[in-house]
Structures are given as C-alpha cells and as structure tokens.
Amino acid sequence: MEAFARELGYSQAELMGGDAKPKRAPIAPKYRHLENPALTWSGCGRKPQWFVEALEAGKTAEDLTIG
C-alpha cells in the first residue's frame, strides 16, 4: 500500500488521513494596542510585549479591551 501511494506521489498517511490534526477556529482578538490598532491579542497564550509594556506603564487590561 505504501509503495502504491509513493507511486502516486503521496505518503500513505496523506491518503489515509493519519497525520491530520483537527484545525481550530481562530480566536477573535480581545485586546488592542491603544496607539497601533493593528496590534491585537486574543488573550490566549503568552502576553505580547506591547501588552506587558502597557501594563508596566500603568494601563490595565480593561483599558486595552476591545469594545
């Protein structure tokens, strides 16, 4: 089976769906940089540097919340 898949230019896992991980839907941003609205963060994972710097400058997470 694996040799046949290679002849077709695929791996056996590609044809059988063995390595496919379910894709997660993107998480909407929850926080936005005050001066550069292109910088956003969903609130998941590591805090971006701009978020940490804003907190150190006296801002609160609520100040950076979108909406």
Image (cartoon, rainbow, N blue to C red):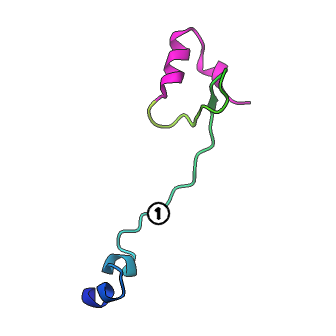
Residues rendered magenta in the picture? 47-67
Left or right? Give the position of 9 relative to 29.
left
Q: Please determine whether, in this image, residue 9 is positioned above or below residue 53.
A: below
The C terminus lies in quadrant: top right
- The residue under the point 35% across, 69% down is 19
Question: Where does the image place residue 33, in percent across and percent down from the top left?
Answer: 62, 25
Instruction: State the residue at coordinates (30%, 84%).
Output: 6
Tally of numbered tags: 1
Residue 13 in percent (x, y) is at 33, 76
Taking the spot 40% from the left edge, 76% from the top edge, the residue there is 17
Outermost residue, top side: 58
Residue 52: in magenta span: yes
Query: Within 10 Å of the Cα at label 1, are there few (<14), some (14-19), or many (20+) other Cα atoms?
Result: few
Residue beneath disc 1: 22
Horizontal and vertical percent for residue 59? 60, 13
Say which element carries label 1. Answer: loop
Farthest residue to the right: give it: 67
Q: Residue at x 37, y 80 (%)?
A: 16
Circle 1: residue type: Pro
Q: Residue 27 is drawn in which quadrant? A: top right
Question: Is 31 left or right of 11, judged from the image as shown?
Answer: right
Q: Is residue 4 within the magenta segment? A: no
What quarter of the picture does the N terminus occupy? bottom left
Answer with left or right where residue 30 lies relative to residue 10: right
Does 1 sit left or right of 31 as displayed?
left
